[in-house]
Amino acid sequence: MKLIAIELVGFGKWHQHKIEFLPKNQLVFGANEAGKSTIYQFIQAMLFGFPTKGKRKKDYQPKNGAAYGGRLWFFHPVYGEVQVERFKGQNKGQAKVYFNNQMGDETMLEKMIHPLTKELFQSVFTFQQEQLSQLEKLSEEELQTSLLSLGLSGSQQLLENREDYFKNAQTIYKGKGSQPPLNQKLEAYQNLQQRINDKEQQEQPFQQLLKELSATEQFVATKRQLAQETKNQLTLVEKQVMNLPLYEELQSIKQSKTTAVLNREEQETLLSIYQQHRFLNEELMRLNQSIATQSETEGQTDEYQFYLKEEEQIQQLLNQRYDIDKLLSEIKWMTQSLQQNQEEMYPLERKWGWNKKTPPQLSFEEQAVNEMREQIVARTVKLQTTQTDLELLEEEIATREENLSTFESINKEMFRKNHQQTKKKVNLLFCGFAGIIFVLSFFLPVPIRYGTLVLGLGFLIAGLLPLFYQPKDTYENEKRQWQEKLSQLDYLNDQLLKIKTEMKTIREEEKEMDRFVAQKVKENHLGRMDQVELWVTYRTDITRYLILINTNQELEHELEKDQKQVAKLSEQTERYTGRLPIAGASLAERIRVISNFADKMEKVRFAQEYQADAYTRQTIREVKEKQQQVVNESSLLLQRFQIDSINEIPNKIQEYQEANANNRRQQELTKMLVGLYPESIEPQQLPKKQAEMVQKLKELETDIQLLQEKEQKILYQRQQMLSDGALDELYQEQAELKTEIEELALEWSAHQLAGQLLMDLLTELSEKQLPNLLKKASDYFKLLTRNAYQGLQLDDGQLIVIHENQQRFMLHELSTGTRDQVIMAVRFAFLYLQEQRNLCPIMIDDGWLHYDSQRKQQLAQLFAVFSEHQQVICFSSDQEMVSYYKELKQPIMELEGAQV
């Protein structure tokens, strides 16, 4: 709203006086006691009712008995122009409101100006000097409460509800109250507790008994818990011991070589292949035996029969000859390479003290090592140069000291001789003439006598002058030279000290570098390569040694794998050691012997087949073709089950059957022993652990029995001491009072919590406006201080002022005038946030007591800027403020008796 005019019918010194206001900025100027504050009080009375009378309150009721009250006109954005009429003697001082050809009452007025209240009018829209000193209003909590009260971010109803909850809570309990029921109960509880304490002091042995009983009960509970835990552990250990054979069986199955599962259909298929192959093989042997019987090779029948029996395995082995030769060649090459690498590593190890277990490492980059070497070289050159300078300087100092000593001796001798020559003596001749003249003057007439006396006095002075005259020292130049030489010697000594200090610093740097190098040598296992120069020169040795180590590791790994393959192949030839001379021979020799044997037997086969008839040869070919057909058809199945030849099928089937049985047994044992044996268990320690736990359990049960007997004795003693019942009654009374206190405390906390929740909700709402408030306050503060301060911030709930040099000040650290400007800026920021609602005009009553001229000028400028959006009414008796309003071309309203 904006004030349009007021009519003071009778209010204080004013009678039948009407004042019209402008919609923007205006200065109401008048001298002290001109009635400016009375106008402000009249506006407040018209809006919110007449002030109550009091001994220390000013009474504005007219003394001449005229009507007490008047009229006020304001513009409302909803109701338009509104007239408020209020007289003390009419309608019990209640207001009459006229608007839009309607008339309302006090309730209608409150509705029109809501949420504006008398308190907000006084604290927010009114500026008086005493308000500018209330620094506590600038805390974060006060700022947020003011925002809520204005209705900018919350609801006035929520505030009222919050206050109701807090009032209800205070009816139950007050921090320093005595009448609320909870306060009384707490006081009664304290008194009762004191009585109990006094009674317990009287029964001190009883308290000791209670402590002993409590400790005993705690010991019993602890022992029982420990005994129960021990029983549980013992039960588990007993189960483990009982099932230990099953656990060992399960572990042995897990450690055995497992094989894939073979079902019955696959077993029958493999057996069918084996039987068919066996039948064909026997038929072939029969045919070959028949041919051998008829042929000339009958003497080789045993060897040939053996060959026919093992022909398939022998041919499989011979088919791998190329791979075996390649494998043996690789082993030979890797062995030679490994030996050569070892021979290359031995000199490096002897030279630098390296070993394969802790190989050398150079963690520095090459550039870093070069920089370290350059630093060492530069430090060495600098040390040599400094050492040379030191030697030259010491020689120079020695020479100068010798010259100075010689100079000193010569000058002492010359001074002694000169002193003897210039010894002070009286001139006896002049003194004698003076005496003679003085004697003769007594015989001369008066005028001449005076002349002779003057002449005699002159001779006397000349004779005594050597006693008072000090001749000029003829050796001042030598003294000056002496001082110069001493100064030069001091300068050289200073330089010597500086050089020694510099050398000490360089040596300390060298020691530090040596320690660093030694540490790196130890950390990187560099052995005798303990100098940076060696790191640069022989860096390739480290690289080569590491390459050799890595190469040897790879070679050893591959060599081990190949040797295992050779051992496996050699194991396959062991079955022929009974027939062929290969025992103790190498794999290559064994292959050669077996190959020769196969060639020999093939020749026998050829001879036999050549001598046989055509039918037999045809039958043999058909049998062989069938054999090959069986082998081809079964190859995929044999590969699937990792069977090298058809002859191994029975053994493999047996292995698979055993594996199937083991798998079934493993599953059965796993189900039986699930959760019984952890991974970290040691089975051999279980019986010992069982015995230890049994003994521990017996000891715990004995301890529990003794403690229970002790507990029974203490309970009996306590019952005897409680026979009078006095302390027991106090305990009962304490329990009842405690229950009542808990109920009241619960009721109090419910009201308190509800109020706090509302406060937290309102604070959350107000915090959304608080940054805007601080930003606008900073802008106004910069305007008031001509940018001497950069702004305002909240730090830990308190307002902080930031200077243009980024210094931070608390409010109590500022001058009085600057504090007033802070409060003025914050107040106007509040008003800016609700300018759209335009609740009330701004009224300032000489609010610049501590302002100098510059501050007043900036304040007048703030009024002019702010009034563009909101009505400002300034009451003042300050002539200087009038001049600033004139400069800004702002309207001035003069009261009676004022001189503008």
Image (tube, rainbow, N blue to C red):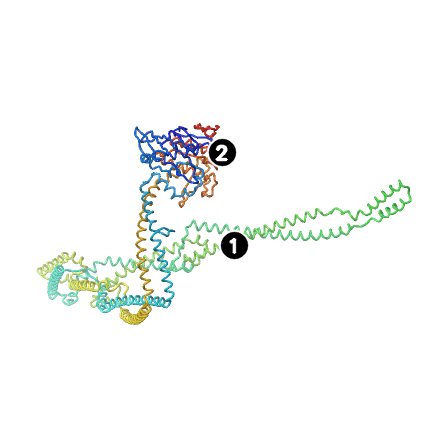
- Of tags 2 and 1, the one toward the viewer is 2
Q: Which residue is mark 2?
A: 853
Q: Tell me the amino acid under the disc marked 2.
A: Ser
Q: Is residue 859 visible?
A: yes
Residue 147 versus residue 171 in the image, above or below: above
Residue 310 in view of the camera: no
Foreground: 8 or 768? 8
Q: Residue at x 84, y 44 (%)?
A: 457
Disc 2 on helix, strand or loop?
A: helix
Q: Residue 9 appears at what percent x and percent y?
A: 39, 30
Most foreground residue, 563 or 582: 563
Position of 220 compared to 534: left or right? Answer: left
Q: Where in the figure is residue 262, as x and y percent of width and height? A: 16, 60
Image height check: is 818 above or below 227? above
The structure residue drawn at horizontal position 69% and vertical position 48%, both measured from the top left corner, is: 479
Name which quarter of the figure residue 844 lies in: top left
Q: What kind of residue is marked 1?
A: Arg
Residue 575 image position (x, y, % from top left): 20, 66
Q: Quadrant of residue 630?
A: bottom left
Q: Mark 1 sits on what residue?
A: 507
Give how far apart the Cα atoms at labels 2 and 1 are: 69 Å
Quadrant for residue 154, please give it. Answer: top left
Residue 166 tag number:
none
Q: Residues within 10 Å of mark 1 (few under 14, many from 20)?
A: some
Quadrant containing the N terminus is top left
**Tag 2: Cα neighbours inside 10 Å, few (<14), some, or many (≥20)?**
few
| Image-based side of 867 in relation to 636, left or right | right
Query: SS of the residue at dot 1?
Result: helix
Which of 203/218 is in front? 203
The disc, 2 or 1, on the residue closer to the chain's N-terminal end is 1
Residue drawn 46% across and 43% down?
812
Q: Position of residue 161 (x, y in %)?
A: 31, 44
